[in-house]
Image (tube, grey):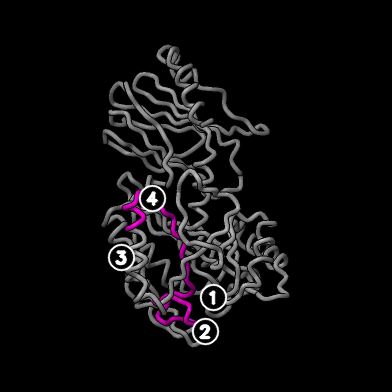
Amino acid sequence: MIRYLAVLAWIGISFGTAARAGCMNLPVKGNVNGRDTSITVMIEYKGAVRHFSVRTAPLKYNKDFAWSFALDDGLASGWLVAFPYFNGGRVAPSFKGAWGADQGGDGEVYPGLFFTDGCGNKVPFRAAVAINARSIGRPGSLDWEQVDSLYKAGWDVFSHGYTHATGRDVDALSECRENNKVVQERLGIVMRQFVVPGGPGDTISEGPYTKAAFGQGMEAVHDGHFPGHTIMIDRDLSPERMRAGRLFLYSGNMRDSMDRYFREIRDLLQAGKRPWINAFTHSTGNDNLWNISLRFPDMKRFFGRLEKEYGHTGKDNIWVASFQAVQEYSLIHQSLVYSVRKAGNRIYIRIDTGTLPVELRHKCQTFVLDSGQPIEKITCVNGSIESYSRNTVGKQLINLCW
C-alpha cells in the first residue's frame, strides 16, 4: 500500500510540470551515510504515451513458478556432471572415484538447459552446492577452484557445517562459524543459506543448527523435517529467516515419483497458484552414491523433461535458480520503494534501494510495463539493464540489476 501511494503521489504531483522540466523534476536521490541509494530508469518510447502501467513481477522474468535445486555435501559430480549438463558443455566420462562409486557421466557434450528472460535471451538452469569446508579438496569432493568457478557462473554456495557433524553432542555454533570463516577466507564468499546435516532419521540436529545458523545471520535454514517443499509466491509469503522444507530427488524412487512431481506442478499452475519448489540430492554421477543420489540418466530424464515442458522449448514459464536467488528476489519485491513519472514519450522509474539489506547477492527486479508503444531505448543511472523487451507493444519487461 505504501508503495502504491508513493507511485500515485509522484504521478499526481509531477504530471503538471513534467512537460516543461522533463527529468529535472525527478525526486531527490536517496542517501544513506553519504551513499547514493537511488536508481533512475528512463524509458523512451517511439510514440507518445497516453495510458500506461508499471509494476514489479512476483518472480524474476515474470515467470509463473520457480524451481530451486541444491547438491548436498560438495561432491565432485556437481562440477563434473551437473554443471556442464545444465550450463552446456562436456560431461565427465564414467570413472570410479572415492568410495568406489562412479561420479562421472557419459563423456558427451550437452547444449545446456534453458528458459528465457522474457525478452528472447536464453538463461541456463542454475543451482547451488551445499559444502563442508573441511572436505573441499579431498578425493570425491569439489576442490576450491571448482567451488569458485560455480559461484562465478551464477550458482550459489550454501553452508552444510564445517565437518557435517550430527547428533546429540554436536557443537552447531562452532560448525556454522568455522564453515563460514574458512569459505570466506578462501574464496571471499559470504554464505547466506544453511543446510542442516543429517538424514531423515536425524531429528536431533535440526534444533541446534537452526538456532546457530540464524544466529550467524543466515537468510534460510533447509531441512527435510521442515513442513512442505512447495512455497506459494503470494502476498502472504514471509521471505525473511525462512525454514525451508525440501523435495528429495534420488534414484531409489524416481521411477515411481517423477510423474507425481510433474502432476503437482501442473495442478498448482492450473489452479492459478505461483509455486516455488525446493529440491535437492547428493551426487549426480552414474552410481546412486550411498543410495541417496540422483543417477545421471535419471537426472537427464527429470531435468530434460522440466525444460521440455516449462523451459524455453516449452511454455517458458519456469525460473530455475537457487533458493537464495529466489528468496532474495522476494525480499526485494516485497519491500522495494519506487515511484513513476511520465513526460511525453518517456517514463521515468525512480527506485530507492536504501532500505534493502546491503549484503544481498542477487540485487535484481523485473518490471512489467504496458504502454501501448514500442520501446525506443532505455538508460539507467546507478544500475544496469540486464535485458528489456524490444519492438513489442503491450506487456513489456525490464530486467534490472544493481
Identify the amino acid type marked 2. Ala
In whole angstroms, how far apart are the C-alphas of marks 2 and 4?
43 Å
Mark 4 vs mark 1, foreground winner is 4
Q: Is residue 107 left or right of residue 13?
A: left
In whole angstroms, how far apart are the C-alphas of marks 3 and 4?
21 Å
Q: Are marks 1 and 2 in contact (CB under 8 Å)?
A: yes
Pick whichever, 241 or 180, lies toward us: 241
In whole angstroms, how far apart are the C-alphas of marks 4 and 1?
38 Å
Start and end of the magenta stretch? 267-295
For label 2, the crowd category at 10 Å Cα-Cα, with few meaning under 14, some 14 to 19 and many 20 or more, is few
Disc number for residue 305: 3
In whole angstroms, how far apart are the C-alphas of marks 1 and 2?
9 Å
Q: At numbered mark 3, what does the secondary structure look like: helix, strand or loop? A: helix
Q: Residue under circle 1? A: 141
Q: Going from the N terminus, do you reach mark 4 or mark 1 first? A: 1
Say which residue appears at 49% left-offset and 88% top-offset: 100
In magenta segment, residue 238: no
- Residue 56 drawn at (x, y percent): 43, 38
Say which residue appears at 38% left-offset and 75% top-offset: 254
Q: Going from the N terminus, do you reach mark 1 or mark 2 first? A: 2
Disc number for residue 106: none
In magenta segment, residue 274: yes
Identify the amino acid type marked 3. Arg
Q: Residue under circle 2? A: 98
Identify the amino acid type marked 1. Ser
Q: Is residue 329 left or right of residue 345?
A: right
- Residue 319 drawn at (x, y percent): 39, 53
Disc number for residue 273: 4
Q: At numbered mark 2, what does the secondary structure look like: helix, strand or loop? A: helix
Residue 189 visible in rendering? no
